[in-house]
């Protein structure tokens, strides 16, 4: 069975016909070529495929594309621009909290959902919120520090991190 | 104007922006027109003869475009010991061994076709332990072992399951042991664990109509992949192109060659269409590669002054079904068998054994974490037995300038300083002589590692300019997270006094276009590529100054390279780099020089092979990085649950190149080490030979909730003589001592000794109950 769905992805309305068993991560990666959401396990254990659905963090490997019909999806590609990074993106760079980068999009979006819900999280809140996002490289310390720093920028309603160079690579 | 300083200062990693915006493309993100999807048929048996493989039914599945089996490509591969074929030919050796593969229009068709490949097996007895593998009359995993092609410094023993054996003989061990008033023997065990990179392995290959093979792959070593593919398929290096996009972690699991031969074999039958081979998470666990298991038995003889005089080390490695890469782990563990200590009389054996388990290979630390689990607990136990504080005992016995390793290499004054690392950790954690609360403990372990690689392993770089004087740095080391591209930018910016934003590191190598690099392994890139960059930068600078001297009509000696210009101080004239990098054009139109570029390389200096009988050599390896970690733990006596509350790490890295990145390496290594210490073990069902926990639901790795409350990192900077600005490698070392330090802290907390990794709550609780310290059973 195929269904026509309309999903608002990163602010753009996308109408496509999808199979009823197509996952949201496949819809984003294969249909829309938004490959920022990664496939790490396809069973909801690693968090690499996390995107925001109506501002909530969702493992997109566990959600069907048809379930996203009529909803708003934000992927890492829609979170910030190089010249106007989301405070989380800037803070991760500032804290050397990115290594291989494979977990980074899911990590940032999970943290974004947390800050949307709770702009003043404690370290324990952050650890609990990110516990479903596996990272094998960083040991998490710098990621947690980055989220703490970003939360202060979010509270101050800042959208950019002023210390960041405009263009890095 | 003060000199710019980019080494040691830190700036955002140069590949960071593409990673936080989702722009970075990994192999599985790449789309190629008309790409086919593969599925691999894997052995369900741990050990069996393959009698027949029939592909007809698979080829009849709609959408299937190619199917291949062992008989189609009976070629051997393996980096040091060529003991593996692309697909099993006559025999399968572990559950997961590739037998055949299919490529189809959609993944579902490929999976369906794979299930229709018919294979006739005749099961054979399987062995799972190295001890069983060396027992007389054990079934042979590789009956043809004696016929395989192998590098001269690996010693497989045909007619047995021993794929390598390195012997270390120094001094007179037996006599020294007899003279010791104290001698202790204990055994330690380490299970197989998996790397668990967040990006599973993925390779895409195409065989174009002109006969060229093009491979995109998640690999640590594009040139070694090309070299081994050429050897395997009998192709010219001129006809194989390997491209490595962004790589999502490797930890050794993407070293050497992995899925690439399967992808190439399918591509050769796919009519010019690209074929993607991607493992799922379960296959990543049981069918790619794993860290080898180890059984270590150590005997230590100590004199009356608390100095170890005699040390015997017997390392028995469970290499799994193939040893192509793992044989060199066996070797490295052999020539490093004494760890961070000076042992005057040594009897060491490091023996690799084939079994019918998943394939052992490189894993961050390359055998060092495993042997340190044994060595560092042994040192602790011996110290307690002879009544010396474990810190003092380590200081009394550790290596340092003027002291000799187990292979007889006398360390020079530029060697790293384990003593300083131990002292720094103790100063922060206060391990010595402190009273503890009940069920809390502190422990320490040292670490050492040298790059384990062929003596001629080399790296090269190209530096060239764009028209706007942006410097492009071409490297072929892979930045799979550790930060090589940023380190390369730091060295280039420093040497040529360019702001980092004017430096672009082209770090996603393409063997058609990029300079040669052996492999990104062995914590060698900062050192090797760093050296090559400094050399190439000196050449670039010489070219710029020579051109400017001619342009200005002044001697070279009066010129200086400053921020993006060449300055002649005596006349206060300057030429911007933009006027020089494409050649200098005089006002009348005539032009000198040309586009400025340079290449340079690095190869280790003066490395000498080990003596084949004793492994003695004055310089067997390029450098040693030493370090120590201390941990503080709390034990819950009711549950056996161990909590690591604080970790203090210190390493002698020669020179900190980037403070943020080196802390990232340290935290990351510590937490990965903590995972292996307390959570991780690849469990095998010995009835079926299958891995029982091949999923992230069952094989747990550390999460944010497992990170200790405090992790501190310190660095000693004793410059490495042949290091770029004194730097030496650190990437692997941060994982090496963590597990042993935790085991030693557990002993300190409650007097129990867990010698079989991992330290699970069940083991701790059982040991507490045996000592009458836990709840009643």
Image (cartoon, rainbow, N blue to C red):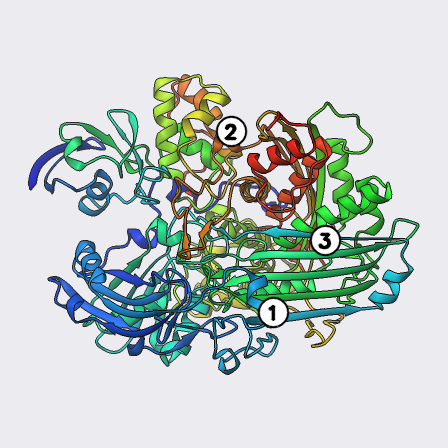
Q: Is residue B246 visible?
A: no
Q: Quadrant of the C terminus of chain B?
A: top right
Query: What chain letter is assigned to the residue under label 1?
Result: B
In the rendered image, the vertical position of residue B688 relative to residue A70, given as above or below: below
Camera-nearest residue between B662 and B667? B667
Q: Count the marks: how many?
A: 3
Numbered label attached to residue B719: 3
Q: Nearer the viewer, mark 2 or mark 3?
A: 2
Mark nearest the camera among 1 and 2 is: 2
- Residue B470: which quarter of the image? bottom left
Q: Residue B603's mark?
A: 1
| Residue nearest the observer in this picture, B547 or B422 | B422
| Discs 1, 3 touching: Cβ within 8 Å | no
Q: Chain of mark 2?
A: A
User: How far from the left and from the top, in percent, is residue B715?
Assistant: 69, 42
Q: Which mark is residue A145?
A: 2
Q: Callout 3: helix, strand or loop?
A: loop
């Amino acid at each position: 069975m195929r269904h026509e769905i309309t999903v608002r992805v990163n602010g753009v309305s996308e109408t496509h016909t999808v199979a009823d068993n197509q996952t949201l991560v496949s819809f984003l990666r294969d249909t829309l070529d938004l490959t920022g959401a990664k496939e790490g396990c396809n069973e909801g254990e690693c968090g690499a495929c996390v995107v925001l659905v109506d501002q909530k963090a969702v493992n997109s490997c566990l959600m069907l594309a048809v379930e996203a019909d009529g909803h708003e999806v934000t992927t890492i590609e829609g979170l910030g621009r190089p010249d106007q990074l989301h405070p989380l993106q800037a803070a991760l760079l500032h804290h050397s909290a990115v290594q291989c980068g494979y977990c980074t999009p899911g990590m940032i979006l999970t943290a974004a959902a947390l800050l949307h819900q709770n702009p003043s999280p404690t370290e324990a809140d952050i650890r609990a919120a990110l516990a479903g996002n596996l990272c094998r490289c960083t040991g998490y310390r710098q990621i947690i520090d980055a989220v703490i720093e970003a939360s202060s920028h979010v509270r101050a309603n800042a959208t950019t991190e002023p210390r960041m160079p405009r263009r890095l690579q | 104007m003060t000199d710019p300083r980019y080494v040691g200062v830190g700036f955002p990693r140069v590949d960071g922006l593409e990673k936080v915006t989702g722009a970075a493309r990994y192999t599985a993100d790449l789309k190629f027109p008309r790409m086919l999807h593969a599925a691999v048929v894997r052995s369900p048996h741990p050990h069996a003869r393959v009698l027949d493989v029939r592909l007809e039914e698979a080829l009849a599945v709609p959408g299937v475009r190619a199917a291949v089996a062992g008989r189609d490509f009976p070629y051997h591969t393996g980096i040091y010991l060529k003991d593996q074929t692309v697909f099993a030919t006559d025999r399968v050796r572990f559950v997961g061994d590739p037998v055949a593969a299919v490529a189809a229009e959609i993944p579902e068709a490929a999976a369906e076709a794979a299930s229709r490949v018919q294979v006739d097996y005749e099961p054979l007895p399987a062995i799972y332990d190295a001890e069983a593998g060396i027992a007389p009359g054990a079934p042979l995993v590789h009956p043809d072992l004696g016929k395989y092609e192998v590098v001269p410094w690996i010693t497989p023993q045909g007619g047995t399951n021993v794929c390598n054996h390195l012997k270390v003989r120094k001094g007179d061990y037996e006599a020294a042991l007899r003279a010791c008033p104290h001698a202790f023997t204990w055994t330690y065990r380490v299970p197989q664990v998996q790397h668990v990179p967040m990006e599973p392995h993925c390779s895409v290959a195409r065989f174009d109509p002109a006969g060229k093979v093009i491979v995109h792959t998640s690999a640590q070593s594009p040139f070694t992949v090309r070299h081994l593919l050429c050897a395997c398929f009998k192709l010219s290096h001129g006809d194989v192109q390997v491209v490595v996009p962004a790589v999502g972690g490797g930890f050794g699991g993407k070293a050497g060659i992995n899925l690439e031969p399967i992808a190439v074999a399918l591509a050769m039958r796919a009519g010019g269409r690209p074929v993607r081979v991607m493992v799922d998470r379960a296959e990543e666990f049981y069918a790619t590669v794993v860290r080898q298991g180890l059984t270590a038995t150590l005997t230590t003889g100590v004199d009356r002054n608390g100095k170890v005089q005699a040390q015997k080390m017997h390392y028995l490695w469970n290499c799994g079904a193939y040893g192509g890469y793992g044989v060199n782990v066996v070797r490295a563990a052999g020539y490093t068998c004494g760890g961070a200590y000076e042992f005057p009389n040594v009897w060491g054996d490091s023996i690799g054994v084939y079994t019918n388990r998943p394939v052992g290979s490189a894993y961050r630390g390359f055998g060092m974490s495993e042997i340190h689990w044994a060595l560092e607990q042994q040192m602790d136990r011996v110290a307690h037995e002879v009544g010396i504080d474990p810190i003092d005992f380590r200081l009394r016995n550790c290596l340092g300038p003027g002291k000799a390793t187990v292979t007889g290499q006398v360390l020079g004054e530029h060697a790293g300083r384990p003593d300083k690392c131990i002292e720094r950790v103790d100063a922060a954690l206060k391990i010595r002589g402190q009273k503890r609360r009940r069920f809390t403990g502190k422990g320490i372990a040292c670490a050492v590692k040298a790059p384990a690689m062929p003596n001629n392993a080399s790296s090269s770089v190209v530096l060239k300019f764009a028209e706007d004087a942006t410097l492009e740095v071409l490297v072929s080391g892979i930045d799979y997270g550790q930060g090589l591209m940023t380190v390369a930018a730091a060295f280039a910016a420093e040497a040529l006094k360019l702001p980092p934003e004017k430096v672009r590191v082209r770090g996603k190598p393409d063997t058609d276009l990029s300079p040669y690099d052996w492999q990104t392994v062995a914590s060698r890139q900062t050192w090797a590529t760093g050296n090559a960059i400094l050399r190439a930068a000196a050449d670039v600078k010489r070219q710029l100054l020579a051109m400017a001297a001619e342009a200005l009509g002044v001697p070279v000696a009066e010129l200086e390279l400053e921020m993006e210009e060449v300055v002649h101080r005596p006349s206060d004239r300057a030429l911007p780099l933009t006027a020089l990098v494409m050649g200098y054009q005089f006002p009348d139109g005539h032009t000198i020089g040309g586009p400025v570029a340079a290449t340079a390389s690095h190869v280790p200096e003066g490395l000498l092979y080990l003596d084949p009988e004793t492994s003695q050599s004055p310089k067997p390896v390029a450098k040693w990085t030493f370090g120590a970690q201390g941990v503080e733990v709390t034990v819950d006596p009711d549950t056996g649950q161990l909590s690591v509350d604080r970790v203090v790490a210190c390493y002698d890295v020669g020179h900190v190149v980037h403070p943020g990145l080196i802390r990232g390496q340290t935290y990351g290594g510590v937490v990965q080490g903590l995972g292996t210490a307390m959570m991780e073990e690849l469990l095998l069902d010995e009835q079926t030979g299958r891995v029982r926990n091949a999923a992230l639901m069952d094989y747990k790795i550390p999460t944010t909730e497992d990170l200790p409350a405090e992790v501190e990192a310190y660095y000693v900077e004793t410059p490495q003589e042949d290091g770029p600005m004194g730097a030496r490698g650190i990437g692997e070392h941060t994982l090496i001592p963590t597990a042993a330090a935790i085991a030693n802290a557990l002993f300190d907390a409650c007097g129990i000794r867990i010698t079989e990794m991992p330290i699970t709550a069940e083991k701790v609780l059982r040991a507490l109950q045996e000592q009458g310290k836990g709840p009643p059973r």
